[in-house]
Amino acid sequence: MLIQIQEILKQYWGYDTFRPLQSDIILSVLAGRDTLALLPTGGGKSICFQVPALALEGICVVVTPLIALMQDQVAQLKRRGISAVALYAGMHPNQLDIALDNCIYGEVKFLYVSPERLQSKLFLERAKQMKIALVAIDEAHCISQWGYDFRPPYLHIAEFKALFPSAKLIALTATATTEVKTDIIEKLMMQNPAVFQQSFARKNLSYTTLLEENKEQRLLQMLQKIQGTAIVYVRNRRKTQETATWLQQKGITATFYHAGLTTQERSQRQQAWIDNSIRVMVATNAFGMGIDKPDVRLVVHLDLPESLEAYYQEAGRAGRDEAKAFAVQLYHQGDLIQLEQGVTQQFPSVDFIKQVYQCLGNYYQLAAGSGEMTCFDLDLAALQQRFNLPTTETFFALKVLENQGFITLSEAVFHPSKIWLQLDNRQLYDFQLRNPKYDTFIKLLLRVYGGEVFSGYVVINETQLSKAISMPVAHVEWMLEQLEKFDILKYDKQKNKPQLTFLTPRFDATRLPIDFAALTQRKAKALSKANAVKHYVTHQKRCRTQLLLEYFDEITTATCGVCDSCVQQKRKQHNQQQVQEKILALLADGAMQVQLLYKIVGLHDEKAFQAIIREMLEQQLLTYQPDGSLGKR
């Protein structure tokens, strides 16, 4: 079996050997054991389920929370000649139907789905017709109420897996405390699981925290000193643009990234950064997940993260090529106060949460009892403007509704327009004869996109068509919509907005069953996580890696040797050694009074000098003379 998986690794990835733990995890999955794998960011988690899936007969269902992550992995698999599809909010029902058929009757090897999809009756019925060999749960910390990104739909995975008792199971995450690991195993109903955990330590990554009032100037100094690609994380969208503009004015090639940009803008900026046309990406935490850029040399946080899990994930995007890299947290005292205030703001009143839920129902014109698993474009600004809702509080109310399992929100993702002609050549020709005003337009579609439009969905470009036929884009869209009404074609119009899905039938907002106890518990946990961040950044003496490992319940006496604390300790020890050598040299010709010795040594820190003398006495390098002077032993 080991030879087989090594051959798969070589054939599709071009690697001769696995990274540490990868082969053990893969063999555990193939042996049929429920498997939990905890590998740090950049540790190669995807190979741990992709390789065994290729060794098994049947399809692998991958549950993952982010559309961007799905699309990235599907694209990577296709480039390697492996058939993969993804199902996500906003897809045309007909596209979903085709994709599911291909999973049942075609050669699809990987099916990527969001956890919400597992609650769809249509998906469950079609999944029962598939030969599912492996269920892989990525970002498995989302299943735990103690995880930093809890997603209630993850709780339905165990029910889904129970429908396929012969399918193997693997869960993977980069960040999990003992509490979260226990919760994952329990919620997935894992039986006697094999748990593999690689150390969270990153030997090549130097962690630093700096108390700094002028954070932007310090950032510039670091960028001037440390060459290579960088990510700068900030808390809000406005600050991404301000910081990127400031860096540009200082001669640094930089751009900004946040969820409010169009998908095309995000894609272009991300690609420019990956290609090294742009050196610095200033971003909110919307940036980074699923991006495989190994040569990032510096990650700087200008604002404090909400949890150490989030910080570890984001900082871990530096140095994935295992070369020296730096993760720096800049903060000032006001940030520590704002961190706690920010956590409190994340939990609006129950009355306001119900008000936002009522506004959603009205906005999408859903009657009470209807709308289960219905998906809509979410224009948050339009919603807030229509109902005069405050911006920040509304966003967090939506997050609470998501955490309570009433809705789910998916990030904006570019979904290009597609068409599929439903008629054969003869039927289409008949339609053109009877409807001459559409004849020229249909001929254009056939000329531009060829016969493929008869066999499945083809990506189209309305702007390109408008130029070719000399009509406004709006009229091209109208023509396509009319042809869809005539059942000539299916038209899946481009989407570029976040998607909101109602997971339950709409409730009467006054009777919305919010779990107040769970909400209170989550708030307490969020405050606990914020306090852990404060402890990490303000601690001055211990190794940063030790502090992070301790948070993840990995206790070690080993120090990293490269973080700010370790480097400072090395300097201190070096300086101390120099002082000791100077003292021994001064006393080589005879004993000397302590105060005179202090003046001659010139340390300018009497307490430090006294500490060195005590240590030298304990090491028996010095001894007190009868007259109270110090001499060499």
Image (tube, rainbow, N blue to C red):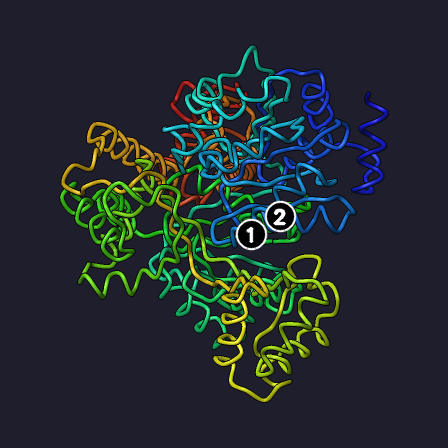
Looking at the image, can residue 582 be seen? no
Kind of residue at badge 2: Ile
Residue at image position (29%, 52%) is 395
Compared with residue 564, is residue 616 higher up or lower down, i.e. above or below? above
Residue 26 vs residue 621, the one in the foreground: 26
Question: x%, y% of residue 374?
Answer: 38, 47
Kind of residue at badge 1: Asn
Residue 620 vs residue 361, the one in the foreground: 361
The C terminus - image quarter: top right
Place residue 11 in its image quadrant: top right
Q: Is residue 198 left or right of residue 344?
A: right
Looking at the image, can residue 214 be seen? yes
Q: Is residue 103 left or right of residue 364?
A: right
Question: x%, y% of residue 334?
Answer: 26, 52
Residue sitting at the far bottom: 470
Q: Secondary structure at mark 1?
A: helix
Residue at image position (44%, 32%) is 154
Compared with residue 166, is residue 96 higher up or lower down, i.e. above or below? below
Question: x%, y% of residue 57?
Answer: 75, 27
Question: x%, y% of residue 267?
Answer: 56, 63
Q: Is residue 544 left or right of residue 45?
A: left
Q: Is residue 121 left or right of residue 524?
A: right
Place residue 418 in its image quadrant: bottom right
Q: Residues within 10 Å of mark 1 (few under 14, many from 20)?
A: some
Residue 190 vs residue 582, the one in the foreground: 190
Compared with residue 384, is residue 247 higher up or lower down, i.e. above or below? below
Q: Which mark is residue 98?
A: 2
Residue marked by disc 1:
94
Residue at image position (25%, 55%) is 392
Query: Do residues under tags 2 and 1 come within 8 Å of each other at their CB atoms?
Result: yes
- For the residues labelled 2 and 1, the Cα–Cα distance comes to 6 Å
Residue 482 vs residue 624, the one in the foreground: 482
